[in-house]
Amino acid sequence: MSEKWRDLRVRGLSAVVMLAVALVAFLAGPGAFQFLIAGVTGVMIWEMCNLLKARHPALSVVAGVAVTAMFIWIFRLGKADVLESVLVLLGLCIFFALLAGRGWWIGFLYGGAVLLSGLWLAAFAALQPGLILMLLGVVILTDIAGYFAGRAIGGPKFWPRVSPKKTWSGIVAGWVVAAILAGSLAVNAGLPVTIVLTWSVVAMFLSLASQLGDIAESAIKRRAGVKDASDLIPGHGGFLDRFDGIVGAATLFMVLSLLGTL
C-alpha cells in the first residue's frame, strides 16, 4: 500500500465500529440515540477545552460531564422547558469562555455550536429521524468522497493556511455525492422535480457546511499547535476530529429548519 493510503485500514476499521454503534443506538430508539449524543458531545467539549488550554485540567472534565448531564436532563428526563434550556446553554457557553486560557471567544462560539448541533440532532432523532439519517449520510459521504478524491486526484489546495490537506477536488467531490444522495432520496420518495432539485442544492450547502466545520476545527488545532484533538479514535484522532463536520452541517440544518426550509 502506498504512503498516501497507509492510514486507510485503521481509519476504515474505526469508521465501521463508530457507524455500527451509531446505527444500533439509532435503531434502539430516540432515548438510546440521545444518550449516545450526550456522551459524544461531552467528550467533544472536553477536547475543545483542552485545545483552549483550560486554566486547570480538571475544568475540562467538569465541562464535559456538565454537558452530558445537561443533555440527559433536557431530553431523557424531560426536566427543562425551552427557556430553561436556553439559559443553561448560555451559562455553559460563558463557562467555556471563562475557563479558556486562550481564545475565550472560541470557547463561547464554537462551544455553542457543538452544544446546539448536538441538541438539534437529539431532538430531530425523535421528531424526524429520516432527516437525521439524510444529514448524517451527507456528512459521511462528503468525508469519504473528499478523502478519496483528495488523495487520488489531488490538485490545488482549498485553504492551505488552515487545512493543508484539503483540495478543491475533494471539496467538489463532496458536493457532488451529497447532491446525488439527496436527489436520489427525493426521487425514491416520489417527489416532484422541483423538490428533487431543491433537496440536491440544500445537500450541497450542507456538504459545504460540513467541510467548513472541519476547517474551523483545524484552525483551532493549529492555534493550539496540535495535530489532533485527542487520540481516542485510532486513525482519526479525537471525537472533534471525527465529528467536526457534523457540527457544521447540523448548525446549518438547524438554521434551515428554523426558517422553515426543511
Image (cartoon, rainbow, N blue to C red):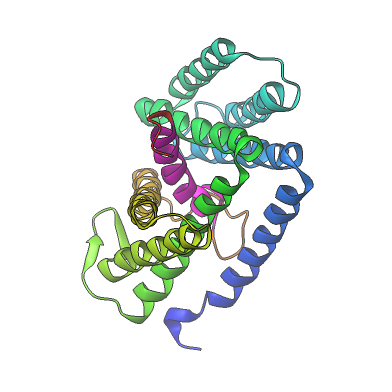
Question: What is the tally of numbered marks visible in this picture?
Answer: 0
When the figure is inspected, residue 166 is found, relative to residue 69, above or below; the finding is below
- Magenta stretch encompasses residue 245: yes
Residue sticking out furthest to the bottom = 1
Residue sticking out furthest to the right = 28
When the figure is inspected, residue 122 is found, relative to residue 240, above or below; the finding is above
Which residue: 57% across, 17% down?
85
For the question of whether residue 101 can be seen, the reply is no
- Magenta stretch encompasses residue 256: yes
In the image, residue 79 lies at what x, y percent? Answer: 71, 15
In the image, residue 132 lies at what x, y percent? Answer: 56, 46
In the image, residue 109 lies at what x, y percent? Answer: 39, 29
Quadrant where the C terminus sits is top left
Which residue: 70% across, 42% down?
33
Q: Nearer the viewer, residue 118 or 181?
A: 181
Task: Say left or right for 175 vs 159.
Answer: right
Which residue: 40% across, 51% down?
210
When the figure is inspected, residue 16 is found, relative to residue 149, above or below; the finding is above
In the image, which residues are magenta?
237-257
Task: Say left or right for 253 vs 43.
Answer: left
For the question of whether residue 77 can be seen, the reply is yes
Q: Main secondary structure of the magenta part?
A: helix
In the image, residue 204 lies at what x, y percent? Answer: 34, 55
